[in-house]
Image: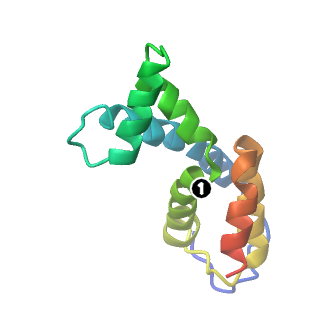
């Protein structure tokens, strides 16, 4: 979708809302991959590898899976992933200018519907 006037598309289509909701799957997969990669002490994820070792010492069998769950619940980690992907989707794919705050706010609200813990972080990004 190409937007000529920043205010010409006041709301998201149902298809666009569904694409935003699918960001949750992307984030779940991304944090899971990060956690399982961190099992390797040479992966470069030193902080995450340390967290995996602590989980194992605590008796957690699937330490990487538990770490993935923890990462998903960390708003800073998730908001970085979501913010980048949301920007690519709204600005890059749909070609909506950043000045169209109404549409961006709607996109953040749709995203926060499936990941409420990132809403405040995304709102801060929009205010820049």
In the rendered image, residue 122, in percent from the top left (x then y), is placed at 68, 63
- Residue at image x 70%, y 44%? 115
Image height of 62 relative to 120, above or below: above
- Left or right: 63 with respect to 2? left
Horizontal and vertical percent for residue 19? 60, 49
Percent across and percent down for residue 73 are: 63, 40
Q: Left or right of 114: which side holds 29?
A: left
Query: Which residue is under mark 1?
Result: 76
Q: Residues within 10 Å of mark 1 (few under 14, many from 20)?
A: some
Task: Identify which residue is drawn at 25% across, 34% down.
Answer: 40
Which quadrant of the rendered structure holds the N terminus?
Answer: bottom right
Quarter of the view holding residue 76: bottom right
**Residue 9 in picture, x, y percent from top left:** 74, 73
Query: Going 61% across and 75% down the picture, which residue do you hit?
Result: 96
Give residue 104's quadrant in the image.
bottom right
Q: Is residue 118 visible?
A: yes
Image color mode: rainbow
Does any portion of residue 12 appear in the rendered image? no
* Mark 1 residue element: helix
Front residue of this view, candidates 89 and 47: 47
The image shows residue 32, relative to residue 19, as above or below, that is above
């Amino acid at each position: 979708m190409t937007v000529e006037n920043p205010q010409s598309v006041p709301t998201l289509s149902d298809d666009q809302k569904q694409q935003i909701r699918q960001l949750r799957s992307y984030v779940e997969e991304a944090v899971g991959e990060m956690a399982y990669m961190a099992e390797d002490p040479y992966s470069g994820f030193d902080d995450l590898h340390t967290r995996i070792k602590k989980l194992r010492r605590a008796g957690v069998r699937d330490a990487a899976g538990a770490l993935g769950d923890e990462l998903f619940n960390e708003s800073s980690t998730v908001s970085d992933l979501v913010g980048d992907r949301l920007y690519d989707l709204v600005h890059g794919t749909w070609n909506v200018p950043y000045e169209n705050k109404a549409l961006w706010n709607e996109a953040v609200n749709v995203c926060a519907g499936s990941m409420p813990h990132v809403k405040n972080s995304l709102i801060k990004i929009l205010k820049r």
